């Protein structure tokens, strides 16, 4: 598992909402905005991670980069251990974003199953999947992903796949600064774990998902 994603798994703790992602623009039509979903994902959750320093690095590290629409939200993976208390702590830490892919920006098209990818996103255990699913407005998304189909957090762990993910479908983690959403009512893209203003200079200060995809294409 690469360092960036590992930092999310090991370092993510429920310590508070990220200021930029938790804010709501009262002038935005929330029925067409990604903000409600992002607010639920970041609620009571924050993670330390090593940022992607450039589009070139994202292309090198990402197993798959896609653009699409957040079609559905399901329960995420759970982990089980020989120790029952540790198993209990491993519940409710992830949610699955089922994304209907419209473009494979980088990586193998075969990693897309029936037009969908299944992305695990870390969240606070105190935020139920139903709250996140209820906030889904099917916003557009650009996702920089790592295949975690064979990953486990420790040798003695068992990772249980979500019931609604097809058995043949790969499982992915989104890089913390590789999950960007934009609804039709949003003037700019936004993330759940960081703000676009915090992207490294090499990204060229993208404002929209079109800008972000353009930066990735230019780096190929």
Image: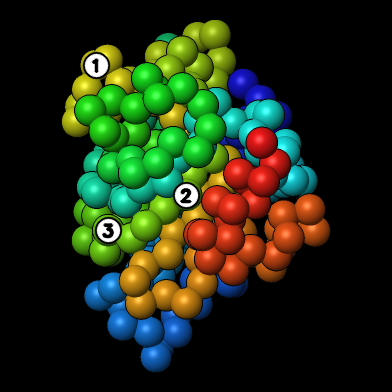
Front label number (2 vs 1) = 2
Q: Position of residue 103 (x, y in %)?
A: 40, 41
The residue at which mark 3 appears reads as 138
Q: Give me the C-alpha separation between circle 3 and circle 1.
A: 24 Å
The structure residue drawn at horizontal position 62% and vertical position 45%, both measured from the top left corner, is 216
Q: Residue furthest bottom?
A: 27
Q: Say if residue 121 shows up in the picture.
A: no
In the depicted view, which residue is nearer to us: 71 or 135? Answer: 71
Q: Position of residue 108 (x, y in %)?
A: 46, 22
The structure residue drawn at horizontal position 24% and vertical position 55%, both measured from the top left corner, is 133
The residue at which mark 1 appears reads as 167
Q: What label does residue 142 carry, if any? A: 2
In the depicted view, which residue is nearer to us: 36 or 210? Answer: 210
Q: Residue furthest top?
A: 155
The structure residue drawn at horizontal position 73% and vertical position 60%, both measured from the top left corner, is 204
Please tell me how crowded label 1 is: few (under 14), some (14-19), or many (20+) other residues with Cα within 10 Å: few
Counting residues from the start of the chain, the first of labels 3 and 1 encountered is 3
- Side of 140 where 13 appears, left or right: right
Q: Secondary structure at mark 3?
A: loop
Counting residues from the start of the chain, the first of labels 2 and 1 encountered is 2
Q: Secondary structure at mark 2?
A: strand
- Side of 128 where 200 appears, left or right: right
Scheme of image coloration? rainbow
Asked where in the image residue 95 lies, by quadrant, the reply is top left
The structure residue drawn at horizontal position 50% and vertical position 9%, both measured from the top left corner, is 156
Q: Is residue 50 above or below residue 183?
A: above
Please tell me how crowded label 3 is: few (under 14), some (14-19), or many (20+) other residues with Cα within 10 Å: many
Looking at the rendered image, the quarter that the N terminus falls into is: top right
Q: Give me the C-alpha separation between circle 2 and circle 3.
A: 13 Å
- Side of 126 where 129 appears, left or right: left
């Amino acid at each position: 598992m690469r360092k960036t994603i590992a930092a999310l798994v090991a370092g993510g703790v429920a310590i508070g909402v990220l200021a930029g992602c938790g804010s709501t623009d009262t002038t935005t039509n929330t029925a067409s905005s990604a903000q409600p979903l992002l607010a639920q994902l970041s609620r009571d959750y924050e993670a330390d991670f090593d940022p992607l320093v450039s589009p070139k690095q994202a292309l090198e590290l990402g197993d798959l980069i896609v653009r699409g629409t957040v079609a559905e939200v399901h329960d995420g993976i759970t982990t089980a251990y020989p120790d029952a208390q540790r198993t209990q702590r491993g519940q409710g830490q992830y949610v699955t974003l089922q994304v209907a892919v419209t473009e494979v920006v980088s990586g193998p098209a075969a990693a897309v199953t029936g037009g969908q990818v299944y992305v695990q996103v870390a969240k606070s255990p105190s935020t139920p999947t139903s709250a996140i699913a209820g906030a889904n407005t099917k916003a557009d998304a650009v996702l920089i992903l790592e295949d975690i189909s064979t990953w486990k957090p420790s040798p003695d762990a068992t990772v249980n796949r979500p019931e609604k993910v097809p058995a043949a479908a790969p499982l992915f983690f989104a890089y913390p600064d590789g999950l960007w959403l934009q609804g039709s009512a949003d003037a700019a893209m936004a993330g759940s774990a960081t703000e676009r203003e915090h992207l490294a200079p090499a990204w060229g200060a993208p404002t929209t998902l079109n800008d972000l995809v353009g930066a990735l294409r230019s780096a190929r």
